[in-house]
């Protein structure tokens, strides 16, 4: 699904260039796909190891300390994202007053992906927090698989 | 007791004349309020300030009429070509009954109070080819760069041109390489972006009077007593008048400047352009949402 | 600085040190800020969503990643290497020079150093260490160093990100990188030439002159790619963002149609990989957008500007401070993080000092790229260590001469803005 999304995104821009289709709505689709690709990907596809992190300290400490760190970060994410969730829902539903420029989609639909992302993050970190409590650990870092691509 | 803080966000830069307007305004209200300005769209992005105000995350803003018409279609009338004749006409309309009706719609539907229109220059057509332009028919086939979006593209067609969307930052090279034949912007922008270096003429079409709206949230407004409100409005009027006069003066100076740079600067048959544009707007879907009779009232003012 | 801001920064640092992905750490810290400052919590979502939605230029990032991926899975890089070998293989240390020239040409197609190192790096490593020709650590160090050029010569992902935070024109930034990129390449070739005789590096069997046209012909579509890309941008046919799409389409078309070297599963894997990388950069951008609101409402960049301009720094002193600061930070932080968090704070001061935004951008990007090979946190070093299976210590030791040479080149580029600005001005830049 992610790949299809990406392909659609590429085709839209390629079409615009090759066939000189009107710039507006293809642009709009591309931007929406980009937003959804990132938030959907971050919610369901990326593993912990693929995200960009500062891992110097994390890799240097012992297992026990790492477990404590895991629990602490999970707790912070769950509490803060959870506290903010009602306000986020309020904002996203408020955005029904605005529509996109070309396809006239209500922004509340376009932006709904944020809610999906936030809920998924809360569930994921609940899970990771419990895993850290139990003492499970994800595998080692592979530097060729992470990074921001620059 | 601490003075209330008024967060203000605008897209224009700190070097803009309108930033001086904001400074004058802040000075005038400093006994009652602290104005906290953010320029260059750094706090809230262009086009997102209105919602930020509606949600009371921002107390004051300089809102584009296009953003208001997104939520109140009847407002699209003030974004149509050849509606306002000049800065003075703009001021008169917003001070009239028509202006009162428009402001009331915004107050009721958007939770914002409009203090007044902030003029920033009339949009003029600038072209690279030397073709003499008198009527809209002369614009046929000219690739005129317009901002993206249906409304802007329609504006380009209402001038008789062939509108081409292109990002603002790419216009200079676009003109240079011939990807577009011309652009339409207020004269100060033409100078800032050095477009005049790659153009041969400026046709003073004055097809759209550029302005934003200085606004405050209903919540902040209603927290003032009647006397404070009156003083606040007076301060806004004075600052806006100053800024408008500066812009008009600047436009006059720039006409001379562009002529000195060797550009042909002249006024076309404005009646022909006005008639063509208003006819196209009235025949379009946009006009369906306009308040009946408003166009005539504005034309008569 | 308010209590709320201190809480937020403290939390972001703590969570990042504890290993939380930086994007999440910044969102969480910003929510804490809003909570403590008593502001609407939904501003976090508002900034993230509107920021991602209104920044058209970021669309170039996933497309450049995809383009580089497609080049690596096709046989494009192989043909490119053959061509470079015919060109410079005959000199002492020939393969080492090939490595650099290949990176310079590859840089003209790809916006990513990681893509160069992880793609051609593997191939170069095998070629250079076969039969004990070159010490493995030296080969790996050279590959890491030469990959740095990738995003300095256009196209460039970090320059797209810089344009995002500075509002400088991507087109002119790209042009500004051309001469500095070539300069970095030359500085590396100088180091290789200077040490080749002393370390007795081998010479490759010279490619016969009559074989040259054939090799060039086979590599032509690859060599032409930078020309097509840049020509498209500066001829006015495509915007830089569209050029990214064209690059991807071009790489795909050549690999599939001309060289018939890409299978559907390969293509699918590249898409999936690019999508994942896009999501992980995207999360960092998202976090930076949210945290940027906190920094702005607290007026941090302006306060820094007032402070720094009160010191009466000359533009050059400021640039030197920035160079040192970024090189040090580059030892600790990931490049995208620096670009999106630290650089925006420095921009108002740079503007106030009258430093050209394109010059500043190129200097900043070179700094960040050098950060990829400075220990202890050099992503390129990690990658080459993995590929070459050499101890990090040897790798770092072999990298140092290249690093010093490039820092020398950076000093020149910092001191002479026209090295950056000459080409953009030639094509109409008004700076
Ligand atoms: Na290389
Ligand atoms: Na590049």
Image (cartoon, rainbow, N blue to C red):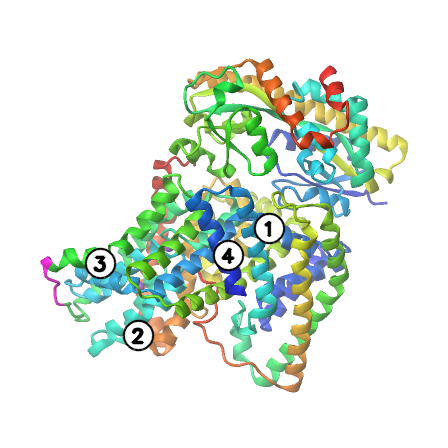
Question: What residue sits right under mark 1 in the picture?
Answer: C53
* Residue B161 lies in the magenta-colored region: no
Asked if badge 4 and badge 1 are on a common chain, one would say no
Q: B52 and B93: which one is in front? A: B93
Chain of the residue on which disc 1 is drawn: C
Q: Position of residue B2 (x, y in %)?
A: 83, 45
Which corner quadrant of the figure contains ligand 1? bottom left
Compare marks 3 and 1 and give the one earlier in the sequence.
1
Question: What residue sits right under mark 2 in the picture?
Answer: C137
Calculate the distance from the C-alpha at mark 2 to the C-alpha at mark 3.
32 Å
Calculate the distance from the C-alpha at mark 3 to the C-alpha at mark 4.
31 Å
Asked if badge 3 and badge 1 are on a common chain, one would say yes
Q: Secondary structure at mark 4?
A: helix
User: Which residues, given as a range, are shown in magenta?
Assistant: C205-210
Q: Residue at x 62, y 62 (%)?
A: C26
Name the image quarter holding the N terminus of chain C: bottom right
Asked if badge 4 and badge 2 are on a common chain, one would say no
């Amino acid at each position: 699904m992610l790949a299809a999304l990406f392909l659609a995104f590429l085709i839209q821009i390629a079409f615009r260039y090759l066939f000189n289709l009107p710039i507006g709505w293809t642009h709009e689709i591309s931007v929406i796909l980009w937003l959804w690709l990132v938030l959907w990907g971050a919610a369901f596809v990326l593993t912990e190891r693929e995200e960009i992190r500062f891992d110097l300290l994390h890799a240097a400490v012992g297992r026990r300390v790492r477990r404590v760190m895991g629990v602490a970060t999970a707790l912070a994410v769950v509490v803060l994202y959870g506290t903010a969730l009602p306000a986020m829902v309020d904002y996203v539903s408020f955005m029904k007053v605005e529509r996109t420029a070309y396809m006239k989609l209500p922004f509340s639909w376009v932006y709904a992906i944020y809610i999906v992302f936030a809920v998924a993050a809360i569930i994921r970190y609940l899970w990771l927090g419990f895993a850290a409590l139990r003492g499970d650990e994800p595998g080692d870092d592979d530097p060729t698989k992470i990074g921001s691509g620059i | 007791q601490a003075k209330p803080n008024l967060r203000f966000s605008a897209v224009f830069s700190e070097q803009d004349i309108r930033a001086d307007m904001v400074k004058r305004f802040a000075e005038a209200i400093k006994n009652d309020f602290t104005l906290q300005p953010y320029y260059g769209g750094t706090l809230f992005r262009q086009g997102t300030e209105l919602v930020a105000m509606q949600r009371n995350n921002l107390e004051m803003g300089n809102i584009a009429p296009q953003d208001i018409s997104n939520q109140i279609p009847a407002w699209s009338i003030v974004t149509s070509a050849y509606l306002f004749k000049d800065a003075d006409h703009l001021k008169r309309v917003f001070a009239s009954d028509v202006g009162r009706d428009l402001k009331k719609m915004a107050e009721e539907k958007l939770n914002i109070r409009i203090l007044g229109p902030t003029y920033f220059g009339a949009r003029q057509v600038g072209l690279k080819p030397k073709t003499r332009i008198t009527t809209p028919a002369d614009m046929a086939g000219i690739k005129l760069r317009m901002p993206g979006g249906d409304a802007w593209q329609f504006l380009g067609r209402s001038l008789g041109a062939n509108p081409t969307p292109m990002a603002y930052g790419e216009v200079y090279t676009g003109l240079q390489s011939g990807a577009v034949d011309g652009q339409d912007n207020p004269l100060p922008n033409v100078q800032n972006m050095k477009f005049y270096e790659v153009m041969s003429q400026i046709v003073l079409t004055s097809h759209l009077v550029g302005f934003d709206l200085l606004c405050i949230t209903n919540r902040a407004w209603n927290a003032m007593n009647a006397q404070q409100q009156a003083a606040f409005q007076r301060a806004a009027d004075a600052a806006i008048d100053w800024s408008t006069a500066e812009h008009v003066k600047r436009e006059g100076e720039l006409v001379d400047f562009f002529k000195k740079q060797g550009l042909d600067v002249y006024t076309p048959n404005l009646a022909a352009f006005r008639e063509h544009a208003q006819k196209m707007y009235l025949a379009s879907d946009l006009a369906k949402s306009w308040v009946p009779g408003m166009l005539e009232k504005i034309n008569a003012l | 600085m308010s209590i709320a801001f201190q809480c937020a920064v403290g939390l972001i640092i703590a969570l990042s040190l504890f290993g939380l992905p930086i994007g999440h750490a910044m969102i969480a810290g910003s929510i804490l800020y809003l909570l403590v400052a008593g502001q609407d919590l939904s501003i976090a979502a508002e900034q993230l969503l509107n920021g991602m939605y209104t920044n058209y230029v970021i669309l170039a990032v996933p497309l450049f990643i995809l383009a580089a991926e497609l080049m690596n899975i096709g046989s494009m890089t192989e043909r490119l290497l053959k061509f470079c070998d015919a060109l410079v293989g005959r000199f002492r240390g020939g393969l080492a020079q090939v490595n650099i020239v290949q990176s310079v040409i590859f840089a003209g197609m790809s916006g990513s150093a990681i893509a160069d190192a992880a793609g051609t790096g593997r191939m170069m490593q095998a070629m250079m260490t076969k039969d004990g020709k070159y010490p493995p650590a030296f080969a790996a160090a050279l590959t890491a160093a030469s990959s740095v050029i990738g995003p300095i010569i256009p196209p460039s992902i970090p320059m797209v990100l810089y344009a995002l935070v500075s509002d400088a024109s991507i087109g002119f930034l790209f042009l500004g990188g051309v001469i500095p990129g070539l300069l970095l390449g030359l500085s590396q070739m100088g180091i290789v030439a200077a040490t080749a005789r002393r370390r007795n590096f081998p010479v490759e069997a010279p490619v016969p002159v009559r074989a040259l046209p054939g090799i060039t012909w086979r590599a032509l579509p690859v060599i032409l790619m930078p020309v097509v890309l840049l020509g498209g941008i500066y001829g006015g046919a495509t915007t830089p963002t569209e050029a990214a799409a064209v690059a991807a389409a071009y790489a795909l078309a050549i690999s599939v149609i001309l060289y018939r070297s890409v299978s559907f599963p390969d293509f699918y894997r590249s898409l999936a990989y690019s999508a994942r990388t896009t999501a992980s950069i995207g999360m960092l951008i998202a976090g930076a957008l949210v945290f940027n609101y906190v920094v702005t409402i607290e007026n941090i960049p302006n306060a820094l500007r007032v402070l720094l301009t009160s010191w009466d720094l000359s533009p050059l002193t400021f640039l030197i401070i920035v160079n040192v600061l970024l090189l040090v930070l580059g030892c600790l932080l990931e490049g995208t993080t620096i670009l999106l968090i630290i650089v925006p704070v420095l921009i108002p001061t740079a503007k106030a000092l009258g430093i050209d935004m394109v010059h500043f951008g190129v200097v900043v990007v070179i700094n960040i790229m050098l950060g990829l090979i400075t220990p202890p946190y050099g992503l390129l070093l990690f990658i080459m260590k993995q590929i070459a299976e050499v101890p990090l210590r040897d790798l770092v030791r072999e990298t140092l001469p290249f690093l010093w040479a490039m820092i020398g080149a950076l000093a020149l580029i910092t001191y002479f803005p026209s090295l950056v600005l000459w080409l953009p001005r030639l094509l109409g830049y008004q700076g």
